[in-house]
Image (spheres, rainbow, N blue to C red):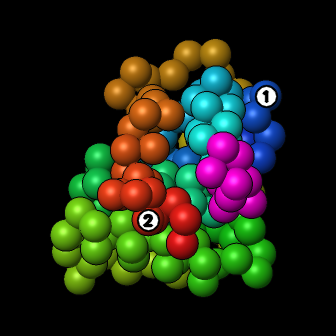
Amino acid sequence: MSYEVDQSGKLENTSVPTVVAFSNGSRNYLYLKPVAKRKIQQHFTAIKKPKSYIYKTFACLIYLLIKRYKLEGMLVIDIEYPGNMNLIKSHVYRIFKKYEFKESKVDFRFGLVGKKSRAHEKALTAFRSKKYSRASIVTSSEVLKILIIKNQALLET
């Protein structure tokens, strides 16, 4: 099965939420509040890796999307951070390895999803809406727990 994945609300803009949505036949999303984004960013700043915040957090959101909604097959992820796709992909695979996730069930590539995509529509609708599903919320502690290994190895690489 093939899914399209899109983001609304850039991670680096910590005054607005970030929504990462997917679409095939069904549509769903993850919602990261601005407060959570600032907490995650502060953690990266504290370990002197402020530039890693964006790519590692985005990789974590992709992993959570796959895990929560049990996505299998091909994911086409919209190019949100041009030139950094390989970096993001390597971070996702590190998370897969950490949690012994069967990466054979899912593969992903980066491509243009487009404004007419159902994933884009879902992400934008959830981003603009004041109402969001509690089940879709991602907390800062959830993200940091995934990214932190003994001696913070995943954060520092």
The stretch drawn in magenta includes residue 49: yes
Residues in magenta? 45-53
Residue 29, above or below 101: above
Please identify the quarter of the rendering in which residue 102 is found.
Answer: bottom left
Looking at the picture, how far across and down is residue 150, in whole percent? Answer: 33, 57
Q: Residue at x 45, y 44 (%)?
A: 144
In the picture, residue 147 is in which quadrant?
bottom left
| Mark 2 residue type | Ala
Q: Is residue 98 left or right of residue 23?
A: left
Identify the residue at image location x=76%, y=81%: 83
Quarter the N terminus occupies: bottom left
Q: Could you tell me residue 92's position as x and y percent?
A: 44, 70
For residue 89, above or below residue 141: below
Q: Name the secondary structure under disc 2.
A: helix
Q: Which residue is mark 1?
A: 15
Q: Is residue 49 above or below residue 29?
A: below
The three-letter code of the residue at mark 1 reads: Ser
Comes first in the chain, label 1 or label 2: 1
Q: Is residue 130 magenta?
A: no
Residue 149 at what x, y percent from top left?
Answer: 35, 57
Q: Callout 1: helix, strand or loop?
A: loop
Q: Which class describes the residues within 10 Å of circle 1: few (<14), some (14-19), or many (20+)?
A: some
Which of the numbered marks, if any, corresponds to residue 153?
A: 2
Q: Which quadrant, please, contains the C terminus?
A: bottom right
Q: Does residue 44 show up?
A: yes
Residue drawn 23% across the image and 83% down it: 104
- Viewer-side residue, 129 vs 108: 108
Q: Nearer the viewer, mark 1 or mark 2?
A: 2
The CA span between labels 1 and 2 is 28 Å
Name the residue nearer the viewer: 120 or 83. Answer: 83
Res. 75 visible in picture? no
Percent of width and height locating residue 61: 49, 52
